[in-house]
């Protein structure tokens, strides 16, 4: 299945049904009167978060969604039925944005969560609604109100506990394949990964979800390479594992390039806990390994983990560091109680 993480669609709620103009005309009924019923409400547009979906490919070729019009009112004071709703089923982690692709409308992060996007129009009143002592035979009824319409963007941000960042060919996909059952494409050329991959990692009886995104290069925030559009998939993560290629001539510069792109993207990525690792250690001699590690430490300000996905050197150590960072972030989140301003009681 093709991966699609954003789609632009048109949605419209249903119009309300029109009211009815009708009069009682029954044999042996001396006095008739208006008996036109009201129209039914138009259908609503709902967005529902469901499990089992991991892409927005369903909205690639079907982009227009319209709810049904409410049933018109009928004689004998019969009210029309409500129009059928439209339910958009989206994966967990889907954001709904206005047409400008910036203004948020809703963020669906829990399976079963529903959001009323557009409300259907109310039905019109039938002529029996307008009967009065001065107008006992009204010959007019209201039309139903029109529904709402708009263009919206659906943007999927994968739900993962940890994320992998780094330059192309830094070993991110190899690391994901080594620690999980995921099978990302791995090759010796840049931009092998063209869409995000997810894997479930288990260590010491604990499990967490790890996300791998396509590599970043200098100028990604301006659209260079694959750009930074996939960085949204690591916005929800609790910790970032920054992999730096140990065979790179200047690992410090490689680290600063990716870090600069994260800062240019914003959205709090630079505030997340970061674990820095020097990858492909199996291809380095002990002297070169020490030299590269010192250069990377000088650039990032912390001692990097020297690891190798091929030989699994320091793999378990790195995973345990990620688990501890995830637990710390969860603990901080649990302790953050929203402060309520206490006002004095007033009669």
Image: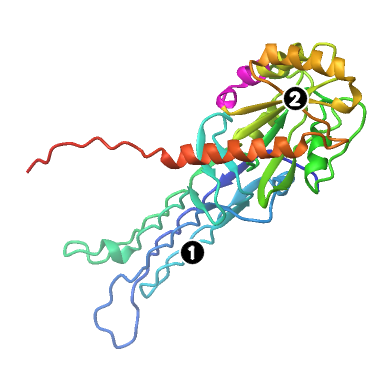
Q: Is residue 271 left or right of residue 171?
A: left
- At which x and y percent is residue 160? 64, 42
The residue located at (78%, 15%) in the rendering is 251
Label ID, residue 212 = none
Q: Is residue 143 left or right of residue 291?
A: left
Q: In the rendered view, would you say 243 is above or below 252?
A: below
Q: Is residue 174 left or right of residue 111?
A: right
Q: Secondary structure at mark 2?
A: loop
- At which x and y percent is residue 227? 73, 23
Q: CA distance from mark 1 to mark 2?
A: 57 Å
Between 132 and 311, the one nearer to me in the picture: 311
Q: Secondary structure at mark 1?
A: loop
Q: Quadrant of residue 24?
A: bottom left
Please indicate, yes or no, whether residue 99 appears anywhere in the rendered image. Answer: yes
- At which x and y percent is residue 230? 70, 31
Q: In the rendered view, would you say 85 is above or below 199?
A: below
Dots 1, 2 in contact, CB < 8 A: no
**Which region of the structure is painted magenta?**
260-271
Label ID, residue 166 = 2
Secondary structure predominantly adopted by residues drawn in magenta: helix
Front of the two marks 1 and 2: 2
Q: Which residue is mark 1?
A: 71
Q: Quadrant of residue 299?
A: top right
Between 256 and 86, the one nearer to me in the picture: 256
The residue located at (83%, 31%) in the rendering is 308
**Which residue sits furthest front?**
286
**Which residue sits furthest right?**
188
Quadrant in the picture for the C terminus: top left
Crowdedness of circle 2 by 10 Å Cα count: few (<14), some, many (20+)?
A: many
Please indicate, yes or no, whether residue 236 appears anywhere in the rendered image. Answer: no
Residue 270 highlighted magenta (yes or no): yes
């Amino acid at each position: 299945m093709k991966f699609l993480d954003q789609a632009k669609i048109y949605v419209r709620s249903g119009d309300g049904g029109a009211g009815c103009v009708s009069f009682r005309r029954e044999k042996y009924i001396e006095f008739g009167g208006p008996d036109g019923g009201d129209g039914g409400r138009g259908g609503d547009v709902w967005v529902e978060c469901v499990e089992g979906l991991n892409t927005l490919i369903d909205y690639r070729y079907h982009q227009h969604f319209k709810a049904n019009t409410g049933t018109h009112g009928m004689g004998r004071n019969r009210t029309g039925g409500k129009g059928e709703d439209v339910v958009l089923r989206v994966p967990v982690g889907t954001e709904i944005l206005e047409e400008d692709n910036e203004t948020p409308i809703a963020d669906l992060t829990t399976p079963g969560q529903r959001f009323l996007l557009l409300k259907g129009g109310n039905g019109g009143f039938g002529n029996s609604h307008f009967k009065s002592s001065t107008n006992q035979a009204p010959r007019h009824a209201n039309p139903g109100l029109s529904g709402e319409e708009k263009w919206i963007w659906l943007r999927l941000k994968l739900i993962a506990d940890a994320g992998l960042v780094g330059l192309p060919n830094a070993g991110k996909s190899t690391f994901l394949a080594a620690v999980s059952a995921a099978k990302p494409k791995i090759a010796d050329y840049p931009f092998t990964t063209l869409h995000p991959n997810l894997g479930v990692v288990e260590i010491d009886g604990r499990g967490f979800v790890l996300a791998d995104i396509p590599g970043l290069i200098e100028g990604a925030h301006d659209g260079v390479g694959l750009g930074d559009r996939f960085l949204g998939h690591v916005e929800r993560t609790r910790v970032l594992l920054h992999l730096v290629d140990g065979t790179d001539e200047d690992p410090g510069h490689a680290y600063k390039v990716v870090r600069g792109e994260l800062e240019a993207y914003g959205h709090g990525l630079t505030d997340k806990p970061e674990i820095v690792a020097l990858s492909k250690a199996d291809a380095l001699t002990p002297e070169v390994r020490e030299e590269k590690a010192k250069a990377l430490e000088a650039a990032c300000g912390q001692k990097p983990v020297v690891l190798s996905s091929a030989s699994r050197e320091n793999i378990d150590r790195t995973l345990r560091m990620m688990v501890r960072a995830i637990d710390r972030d969860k603990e901080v989140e649990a302790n953050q109680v929203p402060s309520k301003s206490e006002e004095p009681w007033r009669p």
